[in-house]
Amino acid sequence: MAGRFAPRTTRTTRTTRTTVRGGHVAVPAGVPRQAPVTAPSTAAARVRAWVPEGPLDLGLVLGPLRRGPGDPTFRALPDGSVWRASLTPAGPGTLRVTQRSGEVRGEAWGPGAEWLLEQLPEMLGAADDPSAFVPRHKLLALTQRRRVGLRLTRTGLVLESLIPSILEQKVTAGEAYRAWRLLVRKFGEPAPGPAPERMSVMPPPRTWALIPSWEWHRAGVDNKRASTVLRAVRVAARLEEAVRMPAGAAQERLELVSGIGPWTSAETVQRSHGAVDAVTVGDLHLPGIVGWALAGDRHADDAVLLSLLEPYAGQRHRAARLILLSGRVPERRAPRMPYGDIGRL
């Protein structure tokens, strides 16, 4: 029976459906690096070492960038490394991040390698200030102490977070993750360097625009979401410019695209900008989770959500993440929403 079951986790690291949504990805403690899964690339890696100020948990910081366990652009390996494949302004790139004795080491391959290494500190939360958060509820104070390595990532890439957020509109997480996985693997390109097997870089805007309608259908994406992606990629350059704008102004620009509302824009800038105050309104579950955690109200709506988070103005996104990472969630009131696959129609 050895090896059939994962070892028990402690109370502080237990994974639940809310902690996963809160951006928790299990990254094993570092062990000596194993051989790459694929044949090594002939191109040498570019390397950068960086020492963060204060504790840093790679799984918490980079967790929100993973779109499901099969995300072809994200991989956490048993050797303690986190891999990301990104389409940067300089081209596709692969980044491997490890942490040893307080020092972070980044290795990158591909045309986007230099850009990824330059962005590495901000991606790992260097621009975030966790000390600015003052917990006003016991639950948040306890969670903050248990999740001392939590920082908010800032990728500096808008479309990378926008497209999967559009795919997640009005469907179950499983449906959205499947669509992202299928589309990226089919229309993206293999990640540069010695990336783990089947890692891919997401397609560029022009490729997204040329995906045939039947391929969207096979991936389970309805016409409304597919059309929103197409409208977004047609103005991709203007949307990417939003990364240099304040988070609020960036949300306003994103919402100028028909089909992108406050939910989608907030989910995007939380990752692209590290927006510490962006609240995900219009969510099916978040108001009830926050209402239950802070007031015992599982029937809370967006108005109650914003009211409960008002004491954390300026830090509302961090407060919501800490609530999700606490794992405190009301029991289900009904079975899971049925999985729908329009690709079979």
Image (cartoon, rainbow, N blue to C red):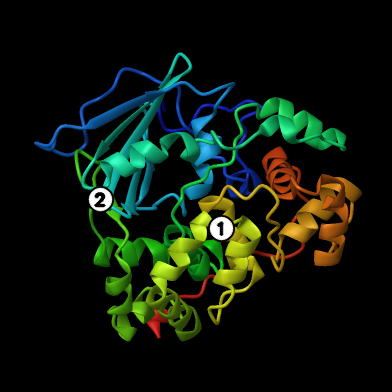
| 201, above or below 5, in the image | below
Asked whether residue 298 appears in the rendered view, the answer is no
**Other-residue count near label 1 (Cα within 10 Å), few / some / many at <14 / 14–19 / ≥20:** few
Secondary structure at badge 2 equals loop
* Viewer-nearest of discs 2 and 1: 1
Total marks placed? 2
Quarter of the figure that contains the C terminus: bottom left
Asked whether residue 133 appears in the rendered view, the answer is yes
Q: Is residue 271 left or right of residue 277?
A: left
| 294, above or below 176, in the image | above
Residue at the left extreme, as displayed: 42
Q: Is residue 48 left or right of residue 20?
A: left
Q: Is residue 142 left or right of residue 168?
A: right
Front in this rendered view, residue 235 or 44: 235
Front in this rendered view, residue 100 or 325: 100
Cα distance between the residues tagged 2 and 1: 34 Å
Q: Which residue is mark 2?
A: 198
- Going 48% across and 69% down the picture, which residue do you hit? 167
| 318, above or below 253, in the image | above
Q: Quadrant of residue 98?
A: top left
Q: Which residue is mark 1?
A: 245
Horizontal and vertical percent for residue 197? 23, 45
**Mark 2 touching mark 1, by CB under 8 A?**
no
